[in-house]
Image: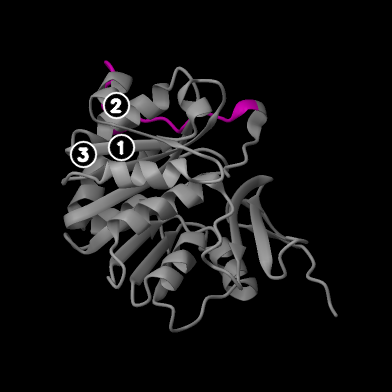
Amino acid sequence: MDEPIPVMRAVDHGTAKLMPDVDRKRAWLLTVDGAPQSYVDLDEPTHLEFEYARRLGHVLDTVVAPGREPDVLHLGGGALTMPRYLAATRPGARQDVVEADRGLLALIGEHLPVADDAGITVHGADAREWLESAAPGSADIVIADVFGGSRVPAHLTSTAYAQAAGRVLRTGGVYLANLADAAPFTFLRSQLATFSTVFEELAVIAEPGVLRGRRFGNAVLVASHHPLDTAALARRTAADAFPARVEHGPALRRFIGAAAPVRDEDAVPSPEPPGGAFGIG
């Protein structure tokens, strides 16, 4: 029987590589310039290998009731891990995926295609430009997982960007973002301050060691205009194989401290991971 072999290709923003997982028959790791971007199991799309992806999944399972068919906008495509997850767990969901790297989209479409009836439509476009041109109130969920290499691009960190995301969401909608930082959390605190200018409710999910400043790592931002079921979310994340903590309310406001919202003219990318390489899972 033929064994899957790695695929490497130059894409718009670097060199992409698809590596088969020897332990799972049709599972693949996507890297771009050596930085892990996505992991997908074509036979089991509900399997979320990366820790941050499982936390996104916990939020989605908490805020999207079974049987609901939400309109979801994904900013950043990668190998379409979360769109595949939602297509499997919420059949009928209508999903748009916006990915600036058209070469990467072509690679994934060729080697890891999604079914025509999955309800997933991909678009080659810049995330912020798409947001600013999208119809108001057109999405129930916005998921931002955009990394230029291993850094969140600067133009996706400002109050103008947060306002664009808020405009696209319907009443009751939820914004999710995969961010990364380390102590003293200058970037993460500024992002929380920025999104607090648009959304009344905020929460952050991260591994306790990251929140204690022991290492660089991912933090999932959750933002909405209505109260979040943080108790249910905390139960789910605490029971994970790699437990995480949910910060919200007064504790999160203390964490933000005196951090100021980010204006377009002051925006910078998220910090470079230590050593220049960062496994986002």
The residue identified by callout 3 is 201
Separation of marks 2 and 3 at Cα, in angstroms: 10 Å
- Magenta residues span 257-274
Identity, as a three-letter code, of the amino acid under mark 3: Glu
Element type at mark 2? helix
Q: Which mark is residue 18?
A: none
**The N terminus - image quarter:** bottom right
Q: Quadrant of residue 48?
A: bottom right
- Give the class, few, some or many, for how many residues have Cα within 10 Å of label 3's Cα (few <14, many ≥20): some
Q: Which mark is residue 252?
A: 2
The residue identified by callout 1 is 203
Decide if residue 74 is on the left or right side of residue 102: left
Separation of marks 3 and 1 at Cα, in angstroms: 7 Å
Instruction: Give the answer, above or below, for where 252 lies relative to 133.
Output: above
Q: Are marks 3 and 1 in contact (CB under 8 Å)?
A: yes
Identity, as a three-letter code, of the amino acid under mark 2: Leu
Query: Can residue 106 be seen in the rendering of this structure?
Result: yes
Residue 161 x/y as whole percent? 28, 43
Decide if residue 185 is on the left or right side of residue 261: right
The foreground one among 226 and 258 is 226
Q: Are marks 2 and 3 in contact (CB under 8 Å)?
A: no
Picture residue at 30% right of the left edge, 31% below the top = 192
Q: Are marks 1 and 2 in contact (CB under 8 Å)?
A: yes
User: How many numbered discs, if any?
Assistant: 3
Separation of marks 1 and 2 at Cα, in angstroms: 7 Å
The foreground one among 25 and 75 is 25
Q: Main secondary structure of the magenta part?
A: loop
Decide if residue 40 is on the left or right side of residue 267: right
Q: Of all residues shown, which one is farthest toward the bottom?
A: 117
Picture residue at 45% right of the left edge, 33% below the top = 269
Sequence-wise, the earlier of marks 2 and 3 is 3
**The C terminus - image quarter:** top right
